[in-house]
Amino acid sequence: MMKAIAPLLFAALMLCTAVAAADPLTPFQAGPGDVTLDDVQPHYDASENRDNGNYSEWWSFVFRLENGYWAYVQFLVSNVGLGNGKAAVTAEFRLPDGTTFSERTDLDRGQWSYAKDHFELKFGDNTLGGSLNALKIHLKNGQFEGDYQLTNIAPPWKPGTGRAQYGASASRYYQFQVLAPLAKVEGTLKLVDDGSVHKVKGLIYSDHQFASIGMHEQAKRWARFRSFDPKATLVFANMQTPDVYGNAPIQFAVLFSDGKKVFDSTDLDVKETDAYQDPKKSEYQVPRIVEFATKGEPRVRGAIRAAMDKEKHYSVPGREDFLETAGAAVRFVVSKFAKPIMYDFEGNFAVEIVKDGKKAEYKGKGAYYYTIVNP
């Protein structure tokens, strides 16, 4: 199973901010979907974030490489923990024989920076930057050093305005952009232990997210899907917000074909069925089928399904229980507010679009994630 885009997000559960019961929710609103430099720059310096213990922001990259290689990269800035403005770079690389190299580089506020007039992050010896359609990543840590070059197949995109506001205050929000719905990637990595050089290529998905609230305030349940097929590239999310917002959804779907946008929407009818029962916890049930439809033109119907094995049975999902892996002190604090578990499946999707009386169908494979923050 592939790595989750934002595993470090759960650290934001450590802190709690009271929410007024009457506060409204403003989900992603319709908009042009164009991603700007201001969107992707770090937002740590915003007045609502600098001293906000719930602020976290990350730029994440999930790779699907050829010839048995695998990789994952995340640049993170967060106030959660021992101080404000902390940063980290997580870099993982796996060889075809299964040997895995995983390194996290932790940085203080004075050890990371970013350019003001173009996109360039410097996190210690690691950098991320370049054209938004052709990002470059340089990594250097105790286990390997290397470079990745991205070339977008589909352009950067965001769901309308890309901003969901929680409550009446403009300082409480979650923002999201897809840096690369799908991109080609080539890279060269050199291992420290034996000096071996590995050239890799394949496909990559990347997004940028940041929030000024903790995840327990942000969501109760959260379905996500992304595909890795240039012919049909689907990115989907459906978040159920907490009771104080009436469980109202924050959602989007966007489909690209050969790099061109076919449709996008931030207003969907979503139905979740065919629950998988967690064998360890009876209250945790995960839908293996998610169906969605647009409410306007063009008429779009789609379905995401957990992949089946050769005997036509659903495969067992990957499972990450945050409270099982957290230390005792963190577990004590987090368990008061949330009990997050993330499940990940290999998945399939199908989409039917009717426009001007003409029907088109798209199918593909990808990664399906479902997080239950609180059952």
Image (cartoon, grey):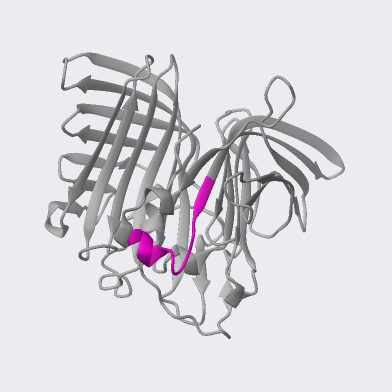
Q: How many numbered discs sit on the rendered protein?
A: 0
- Compared to residue 298, the image places residue 214 above or below, namely below
- Residue furthest to the left in view is 110
- Compared to residue 230, the image places residue 272 above or below, namely below
Determine whether, in the image, residue 122 is placed left or right of residue 323.
Answer: left
Residue at the spot 72% in from the left edge and 33% down from the top edge:
362
Q: To which quarter of the image does residue 83 belong?
A: bottom left
Q: To which quarter of the image does residue 146 belong?
A: top left
Point out residue 138 in the picture as x, y percentages from the top left corner: 24, 34
Point out residue 153 in the picture as x, y percentages from the top left corner: 50, 32
Question: Does residue 263 appear in the picture of this structure?
Answer: yes
- Compared to residue 138, the image places residue 217 above or below, namely below
Residue at the spot 57% in from the left edge and 70% down from the top edge:
242
Point out residue 200 in the picture as x, y percentages from the top left corner: 36, 19
In the image, is residue 337 part of the stretch drawn in magenta? Answer: yes
The magenta stretch spans which residues? 330-342
Residue at the spot 40% in from the left edge and 39% down from the top edge:
61
Front residue of this view, candidates 355 and 362: 362
Determine whether, in the image, residue 274 is placed left or right of residue 143.
Answer: right
In the image, is residue 256 part of the stretch drawn in magenta? Answer: no
Determine whether, in the image, residue 107 is placed left or right of residue 9.
Answer: left
Question: Does residue 42 appear in the picture of this structure?
Answer: no
- Residue furthest to the right in view is 357
Front residue of this view, candidates 230 and 223: 223
Determine whether, in the image, residue 331 is placed left or right of residue 303.
Answer: left
Front residue of this view, candidates 299 and 16: 16
Point out residue 185 in the picture as x, y percentages from the top left corner: 40, 27
Q: Quadrant of the C terminus?
A: bottom right
